[in-house]
Amino acid sequence: MPEVVALVDYGAGNLHSVHNALRAAGAEVTVTADPYVVRAADRIVLPGVGSFKACAEGLRAIPHMVEAMTERVHVGGAPFLGICVGMQLLADRGLEHGETPGLGWVPGEVRLIQPSDAAIKVPHMGWNDVALLPHARGSAVIEEGEAYFLHSYHFAADNPHDVAAMTDHGEGLVAAVARDNIIGVQFHPEKSQAYGLATLRRFLEWYP
């Protein structure tokens, strides 16, 4: 039987486009707000657009969803992909509209992009390079290329080895994090054309 990918529906905003991109990449996708479905899924994708605070509160508003995700990923070993704010939620906390707790799966915090050059505009919007770090060469999911970004806050990881790829927008910004069976990407695969679809296909074929 084909694997089932649970696409978590918590009012994150980019659900429809991520769903279509996953299907185009070959996934059998179940859009769900049911923690029991998440517990049974083969893979989990957490999308997200908007503010860290709104997304964190929306996710926690679904009874038992965080517990179901945590159990399936950390105990069951299901591959997990966080996209944009879905990646940022992996951090310990976000500082957008005050301090808000994250999932704490990848230690760090999400801070406002504050480039030293006033000519650098925020948000970071548009196509930019995804550059793998040396320890992430040969990554099963993230490869070098160009992807579409749209964000005003960035993931500041505590451990450099959790950072798989960087991009540049007046300063180095985290483009992807990876830890065990967890991947997070700051860019939007669903808006990144061939590069994005290839990233999703690699995630679907990934057995960490």
Image (cartoon, grey):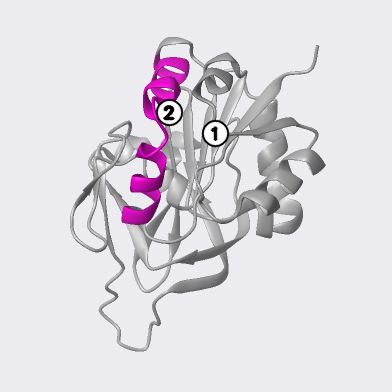
Residue depicted at 34% across the width and 47% down the height = 57
SS for tag 2?
A: helix
SS for tag 1?
A: loop
- In screen coordinates, is 141 left or right of 56? right
Instruction: Return the x and y of residue 59 as percentages of the image width and height.
Output: 41, 40
Predominant secondary structure in magenta? helix
Asked if disc 2 and disc 1 are in contact, CB closer than 8 Å, the reply is yes
Q: Which residue is mark 2?
A: 65
Q: Amino acid at mark 2?
A: Met
Instruction: Return the x and y of residue 136 as percentages of the image width and height.
Output: 47, 36
Q: CA distance from mark 2 to mark 1?
A: 8 Å
- In screen coordinates, is 197 left or right of 53? right
Which residue is the extreme one toward the bottom?
Answer: 119
Q: Which residue is mark 1?
A: 33
Instruction: Return the x and y of residue 5 as percentages of the image width and height.
Output: 66, 27
Q: Is any atom of residue 165 visible in this view? A: no
Q: Is residue 118 above or below residue 141?
A: below
Which residue is the extreme one toward the left?
Answer: 99
Q: Which residue is nearer to you in this view: 174 or 5?
A: 5
Q: Amino acid at mark 1?
A: Ala
Instruction: Return the x and y of residue 132 as percentages of the image width and height.
Output: 50, 46
The quarter of the picture where the C terminus appears is top right
Q: Is residue 96 above or below residue 46?
A: below
Residue segment shown in magenta: 53-74
Between discs 2 and 1, the one toward the N terminus? 1
